[in-house]
Amino acid sequence: MMNDGPNWFHPKRYGMGSGLPSAWQGWVVLLAFLLIVTGTAFMFAEEQPIIFFAIILPVTAIFMLIAAKTTPGGWKWRWGKDDK
């Protein structure tokens, strides 16, 4: 799966997924995700866990989709620095 779009996240060296952000847009997306998760946890986690999960699950799915679409080479299994 080739990615010709923006490169906001580094690909992981080992395993599947994205590493740390490589562009300011990736850092903004990561910070927004962390703020939403933290704010939702403080507001809903103890007293209303259903609302907590109803917010966290789609936000996490959207974050993962953005990270996958903006990682060079997409998400695939990698075995080290020789695997591109």
Image (cartoon, rainbow, N blue to C red):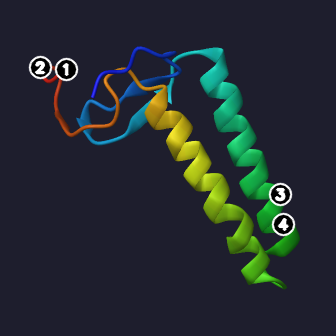
Residue 23 falls in image quadrant? top right
Compare marks 4 and 1 and give the one earlier in the sequence.
Answer: 4
Disc 4 or disc 1, which is closer to the eye? Answer: 1
What is the C-alpha distance between the residues marked 2 and 4? 43 Å
The amino acid type, in three-letter code, at marker 3 is Gly
Residue 30 rendering spot, x and y as whole percentages: 64, 36
Mark 3, secondary structure of its residue:
helix
CA gap, disc 4 and disc 3:
5 Å
Query: Tags 2 and 1 in contact by the CB under 8 Å rule?
Result: yes
Among all residues in the image, which is located at the extreme right? 43
Query: Residue 11: image x %, image y %?
Result: 35, 27
Whether residue 76 is situated above or below residue 6 in the rendered picture: below
* Tag 3 residue: 39
Residue drawn at x 71%, y 71% is 54
Residue ID for mark 4:
42
Q: Earlier in the sequence, mark 2 or mark 4?
A: 4
Residue of label 1: 84
Q: Which residue is mark 2?
A: 82
Q: With respect to residue 65, does 54 lie above or below?
A: below
How far apart are the two marked residues, 1 and 3, measured between alpha carbons? 37 Å
Q: Residues within 10 Å of mark 4 (few under 14, many from 20)?
A: few
Q: Are marks 4 and 3 in contact (CB under 8 Å)?
A: yes
Q: Quadrant of residue 59?
A: bottom right
Q: Of marks 1 and 3, which one's residue comes earlier in the chain? A: 3
Q: Is residue 35 left or right of residue 7?
A: right
Name which residue type carries label 2: Asp
Identity of the residue drawn at 62% across and 64% down: 57
